[in-house]
Amino acid sequence: SATVTLQLDGIFVGPASISNTASVSSSTYDSNAGNNVASATIPSQVANLAVRKSVDNVNADFGSTVTFTVIVDNNGPDAAGNVRVQDALPTGLTYVSHTASAGTYVPASGLWTVGAMPNTGTATLTITATVTGTAPAQNRATVSADQYDSDTSDNTAAADVVPRAANLRIAKGVSNPQPVDGEIITYTLTATNDGPSAATSATVSDALPAGLTFIDSSA
């Protein structure tokens, strides 16, 4: 007897199951034709993955921290393997920490390797970052897996952060820079906010030095 082996490689594109049939024949009489046909079937593999994303503070102050929450759902009907989410922080947000309910997250690349997810399974990732820019920043997450996804419209989600930042400046003038003893002089202070956001709880401090006696003020 003699045996010859042939290996064929293909890419499964689903979603329907695939049956691959092979047959063998020869010009020589075959004493047992009943085993001349063999089949192998790949079952249907469909995993409808979806990703959701939110942030705890859209209008965060410059220098404060925000926390993003990323939720991945496997809506089935089959289990999903090698589930992964790409979620890299954009310019204007600096990584602080993270927690993942499954798998591992690498901040440098933004890759969250979730791994296997059963039908109806859910995994959650939270990322805390510092707001280091003043321009709006959008953080996007995209999910993928080895199985065919019947609906890719929900494979990407985003959350925006629009930082609040105020550029304050102050100018000061005096009515007479060379007064005589006993003369009343007036200081004028002008505070300006060049934006882009409104300034909250803004205060101006101006204590008179020795040699000046306070009379009154107006604002």
Image: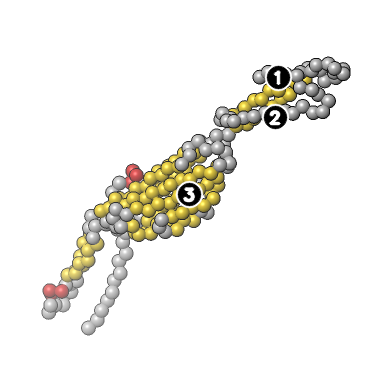
Give x and y (percent) for residue 87.
Answer: 46, 49
Residue lying farthest bottom?
1
Instruction: Please tell me whether residue 78 is drawn above or below residue 68 in the rendered image.
Output: below
Q: Quadrant of residue 203?
A: top right
Residue 19 horizontal side relative to residue 162, left or right: left
Q: Are marks 2 and 1 in contact (CB under 8 Å)?
A: no
Residue 217 horizontal side relative to residue 202, left or right: right
How far is disc 1 from disc 3 in space, using C-alphas?
49 Å
Instruction: Please tell me whether residue 183 is drawn above or below residue 63 in the rendered image.
Output: above
Q: Return the mark for residue 217.
A: 1
Query: What amino acid type is highlighted by mark number 1?
Result: Ser
Mark 1 or mark 3, earlier in chain: 3
Mark 2 or mark 1, earlier in chain: 2
Q: Residue at x 62, y 30 (%)?
A: 202
Give x and y (percent) for residue 140.
Answer: 44, 44
Q: Nearer the viewer, mark 2 or mark 3?
A: 2
Query: What amino acid type is highlighted by mark number 2?
Result: Ser
Query: What amino acid type is highlighted by mark number 3?
Result: Ile
Q: Quadrant of residue 133?
A: top right
Q: Residue at x 68, y 18 (%)?
A: 218
Q: Nearer the viewer, mark 2 or mark 1?
A: 1
Instruction: Please tell me whether residue 36 is drawn above or below residue 100 in the rendered image.
Output: below
Neighbour tally class for label 1: few under 14, some 14-19, many 20 plus, Cα within 10 Å: few
Residue 23 horizontal side relative to residue 95, left or right: left
Q: Residue at x 41, y 56 (%)?
A: 101
How far is disc 2 from disc 3 in space, using C-alphas?
38 Å
Q: In which quadrant is the N terminus drawn?
A: bottom left
The residue identified by callout 3 is 127
Mark 2 or mark 3, earlier in chain: 3
Give x and y (percent) for residue 85.
Answer: 41, 52
Q: Residue at x 34, y 53 (%)?
A: 122
The residue identified by callout 2 is 205
